[in-house]
Amino acid sequence: MNLGFIGLGIMGKPMAGHLMAAGHTLFVHSRSGVPAEVLTQGAQACASPAEVAQKADIIFTMVPDTPHVQDVLFGEHGIAKGLTAGKTVVDMSSISPIATKGFAAQINALGCDYLDAPVSGGEVGAKAASLTIMVGGSEAAFNKVQPLFAVMGKNITLIGDNGSGQTCKVANQIIVALNIEAVGEALLFAAKAGADPAKVRQALMGGLATSRILELHGERMIKRTFNPGFRIELHQKDLNLALEGAKAMGLSLPNTANAQQLMNTCVAHGGAAWDHSGLVRALEIAANFQVAGN
């Protein structure tokens, strides 16, 4: 199948690689240039998103934020300029659910399908093809793309209409942020009390407190490996979407707001590009004490 992939960063590059490994022809474009590794795998570089759309039947996008998606879709050389009726656009970025509904309507008006399909699992999941994929759109479009999703992920769910995938991703990011904060507080408490945080983590992995966050990000906190991963500035963006949506709906999300403040502290200390497990640094700065390496 002729596929397009736009956005070949930390997440997009391995995802595109899995599609090629499954035998599909890939037409690609990336704002920062197509990585040599992707070209070596057999991808064909295109000069613009419009050219990708002209050559591919299903076009995937994986870019950082809502304005980037809007530009890739509807910019001067955007995907919309290269679409013909019957094609499908699949946005796997994590962006505004409200904006997504508008983007979908504009693509549908061109006679094409649109799926919002954000992912969870980070760089590890992208490389292992074990991503969770949360999809919004029509069942017919989902069924058409589902075999391709299965090449990139394991837990694939059609949530509902367009925008539902992005809503689910925002909910995911609330849970992840609050879990990172909880693990950070627990390990900081243990370390300050004189316990070995590595042994505390090991013990907790066998009980009710165990989680993927404790397993992966607890280890990062102890080993001080805050290279991304998933950057704090991107998680910060996701929590902004949560808080903006909550305000519009009249909801109170106090712990989400607190996690966002901790991320703001990290950014203020030069941590925008840290892995989101680096949220613990905000707690450490306030305590003048580190989980490890004191």
Image (spheres, rainbow, N blue to C red):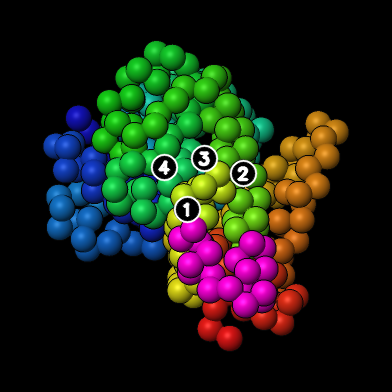
Position in image of residue 115 (x %, y %) = 46, 27
Indicate the quadrant where residue 174 lies.
top right
Disc on the earlier residue, 2 or 4: 4
Question: Amino acid type of disc 3?
Answer: Phe
261 vs 97, left or right, is right
Looking at the picture, does residue 266 appear above or below residue 230?
A: below
Q: Which mark is residue 61?
A: 4
CA gap between label 3 and label 4 equals 13 Å
Disc 3 vs disc 2: which is toward the camera? 2
Disc on the earlier residue, 1 or 3: 3
Position in image of residue 21 (x %, y %) = 16, 43
Q: Which mark is residue 175?
A: 2
Q: What count of labels does the image hold?
A: 4
Label 1: how many Cα within 10 Å (few below 14, some 14–19, many 20+): some
Disc on the earlier residue, 1 or 2: 2
**Dot 3 and dot 4 residues touching (CB under 8 Å):** no
Looking at the picture, does residue 87 appear above or below residue 139?
A: below
Disc 1 vs disc 4: which is toward the camera? 1
Question: Amino acid type of disc 1?
Answer: Met
Disc 1 vs disc 3: which is toward the camera? 1
Q: Residue at x 49, y 75 (%)?
A: 224
Label 3: how many Cα within 10 Å (few below 14, some 14–19, many 20+): some
Indicate the quadrant where residue 18 lies.
top left
Disc on the earlier residue, 1 or 4: 4
**Dot 1 and dot 3 residues touching (CB under 8 Å):** no
* Residue 202 is inside the magenta segment: yes
In this orientation, which residue lies closer to the viewer: 26 or 218?
Answer: 218
Question: Amino acid type of disc 2?
Answer: Ile
Quarter in which the N terminus is drawn: top left
Judging by the rendered image, the residue that carries numbered circle 3 is: 74
Q: Which residues are magenta?
A: 185-203
